Image: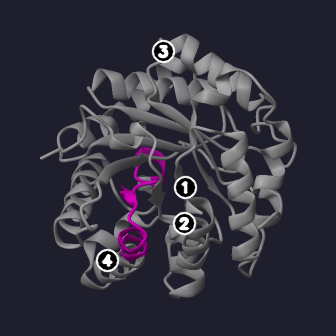
Amino acid sequence: MSLYRQNLPQAKGDIFLADGGLETTLVFHDGLDLTCFAAFPLLDTVKGRDALRGYFARYLQIAAKNGMGFILDTPTWRANTDWGAKVGYDQPALDRINRAAVAFIDDLRANLANAGKPIVLSGVIGPRGDGYVAGEAMSEAEAETYHARQAVAFADSACDMVSATTMTNVPEAIGIARAAKAAGMPVVISFTVETDGRLPTGDTIAQAIAATDRATGGYPAYFMINCAHPTHFQEHLGKGEWIQRIGGVRANASAKSHAELDTATELDPGDPQELAEQYRELRRLLPRANVLGGCCGTDHRHIEHISHRCAA
């Protein structure tokens, strides 16, 4: 049963942690082979579920130790029609795995208590295309139809919210927000940017947030930035009401561009302590950004440092 769908606790302003770079950790640290960077097939094997359970347990322990809430994501970033087909999952199989993903993290929430702090179950929807490039964008209506089935799967589960992550373009973000609204689910939209602080389509973060809010009546609970290093967007934040709409950050460990990361054969973990300092500065610039996690290259060490530095 959903606990927080009607009242997301992170909206009250306390710091909530999230995990780091799931796929990069599983591939580069745990030695797992993720076809098409898809983690959701792990749910169909005992070994895979054990790997995911161990991965999330580390982060929940950090949150509990530091007295912070936690946003617990499903490993479903690739669990849509196009990517699912590439790893052998048809639509009925995807419906099953999306619901199974929520059941899996619901079990984690029940059995890995967080010292009385809320654990929010987040159903992750990723982009139809590559998360590093805009590609051929769908229309808003096409995006709503395309992502609706995954949103409905989450609505028919214990999921508390939907998180659309690594959004490269505005129409897809709008479509997902509308699909979540139709399914009765709160939604968070997380955009990614290039080294110039702009989406791969060329839109600024401010433009993307304003356009999404305008087209959806301000439906997203809040927005986030993910899959970019703080140095890529910090200087481009500026001022304006749109800053108040950014509720979290999940940055990359590496300052490399998306193109460089896409061809990298080794993981660039950056400097966890330096990243934590950059998060502390981001918290000053983004006063409502209280959901703090990581993306590519980050692991539990980065989140540990971030939690300590931002709570200081």
Residue at image mark 2 = 307
Query: Is disc 3 in contact with disc 1, using a CB cutoff of under 8 Å?
Result: no
Residue at image mark 1 = 292
Sequence-earlier tag: 1 or 2: 1
Q: Which mark is residue 53?
A: 4
Sequence-earlier tag: 3 or 4: 4
Judging depth in this view, the residue of 306 and 56 nearest the camera is 306
Identify whether 287 is placed above or below 281. above
Residue 34 on image: x %, y %: 50, 73
Give the CA separation, mark 2 to mark 4.
21 Å
Viewer-nearest of discs 2 and 4: 2
Residue 265 visible in the snapshot:
yes
Query: Is disc 1 in contact with disc 2, using a CB cutoff of under 8 Å?
Result: yes
Amino acid type for the residue under numbered disc 2: Ser
Stretch in magenta: 59-83
Local crowd size for mark 2, using a 10 Å CA cut-off: few (<14), some (14–19), many (≥20):
many
Residue 287 on image: x %, y %: 62, 39
Local SS, label 2: helix
Q: Is residue 227 left or right of residue 90?
A: right
Amino acid type for the residue under numbered disc 1: Leu
Residue 173 on image: x %, y %: 54, 30
Q: Residue at x 74, y 82 (%)?
A: 266
Q: Which mark is residue 32?
A: none
Q: Is residue 61 magenta?
A: yes
Total labels: the figure holds 4
Residue at image mark 3 = 216
Amino acid type for the residue under numbered disc 3: Thr
